[in-house]
Image: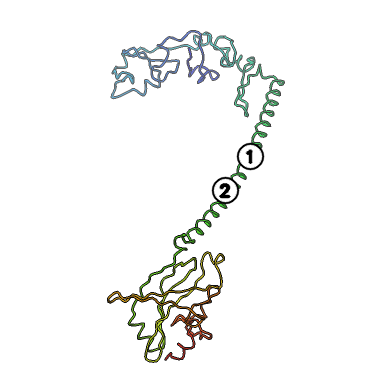
Amino acid sequence: MQHTLVGFSTELDWRPLYFLKPLPPNRVCSACGLVRPKTALLPCAHTLCEPCYGQCAEAGLHVCPLDGYECQDEDVDWRELRADDVFRREVKCWNQGTGCDYVAPASRIAQHFHHDCGHHSVRCPNFARIMSKVSGSNQELKGVLFMGKIVKDEIANAARKTVDKLSECASAIEAVKAAVQEKNEFIQKVDDHMKSIPRNSELGKTLCVFSVKDVKSLLQTAMKTGGSCYEGELVYLRGYHLSPGVAFRKDGECLKLDPLLRVYKGTIDDALQWPFQPRINLGVIHPKGGKDCMVQVSGGLDWRPLTFLKPIPANRVCSTCGLVRKSTALLPCMHVLCECCYENWD
């Protein structure tokens, strides 16, 4: 049974002792659990040491801290425990946990512990292993240290191998990322290119219908300046990227209607025949009455079937009439006028 003595000996005080036979309960304080030379036995059968009893005083009475029983001083039975009675009792060595089986009277246990016991223990700083004095010979300690070094080296080698493997994995991951990025960029380029290529149905068109807007204004402009034009939206006809339209040309007091065709860069120009020599059929449907007429244009370069190389630079096309003439004028505003439009420009 373990008890802690206080007030008996500097060597034994405040150190738990393992008694072979437990002390009587009336010698152990019921409040703090310590064993002191003087104890008070209360009427409620609880035992208090002298310091604990002194702290239980309230208004001339003493109140038991365990059950609240109130009593007078004369009701308390004081008892003393002599040091000799304690020192004769047999106790176990404090090193019993590390293998010491020594038993002696309490008066001699300190001498044994400090000078004779061979079971003192220390804690290994590397492995948190408890080493006893008896088993911890120099040879064993050297062996433990040697094994510790081996384990440490093995851990270091394993760590280095792990770092190398992680580096290889990181390099492989970066390579995969680069390959995926390159593949994604290629797919994006292909996708963009596919989106830019018209469908076969669009490339194979041979007919385009468009409406000329604000004809009255175009006629007035042509009468005033000598010519005007209307250009429709871009379409693909037989694979060529074109913008069809019409041009109004002043001829004396009359206006003549001519087909207008502008060739732009297309997606399959390299697969087409150049020079471009179209045969244009221009059909006109009048908004009033629905009367239509068909005109086939053929002949040379001037107002007749047109012959184009690849798309003409923009600075060679008149910004007013849309025609391509031998000479053009580039205005400060960056617009281009053909010779005829420039002469009629006021």
Give residue 50's position: percent from left, percent from top: 40, 19
Q: Is residue 175 above or below residue 144?
A: below
Give residue 165's position: percent from left, percent from top: 63, 39
User: In the picture provided, is 150 more to the left or to the right than 184?
Assistant: right
Seen at 61% across and 41% down, the residue is 169
User: In the picture provided, is 64 more to the left or to the right than 83?
Assistant: left
Give residue 306's position: percent from left, percent from top: 50, 77
User: In the picture provided, is 102 more to the left or to the right than 16?
Assistant: right
**Which residue was labeled with disc 2?**
177
**Depth check, front residue: 150 or 322:** 322
Disc ID at residue 284: none
Seen at 61% across and 14% down, the residue is 112
Q: Quarter of the image holding residue 38?
A: top left
Q: Residues within 10 Å of mark 1 (few under 14, many from 20)?
A: few
Query: Which kind of residue does numbered mark 2 sit on?
Result: Lys
Query: Which kind of residue does numbered mark 1 sit on?
Result: Val
Q: CA distance from mark 1 to mark 2?
A: 21 Å
Seen at 42% across and 18% down, the residue is 33
Secondary structure under badge 2?
helix
User: In the picture provided, is 188 more to the left or to the right than 67?
Assistant: right
Look at the image and name its color scheme. rainbow
Callout 1 touching callout 2 (CB < 8 Å): no
**Depth check, front residue: 332 or 173:** 332
Q: Quarter of the image holding residue 63?
A: top left
**Which residue was labeled with disc 1?**
163
Earlier in the chain: of badge 1 and badge 2, it is 1
Give residue 272's position: percent from left, percent from top: 54, 67
Q: Is residue 175 above or below residue 145?
A: below
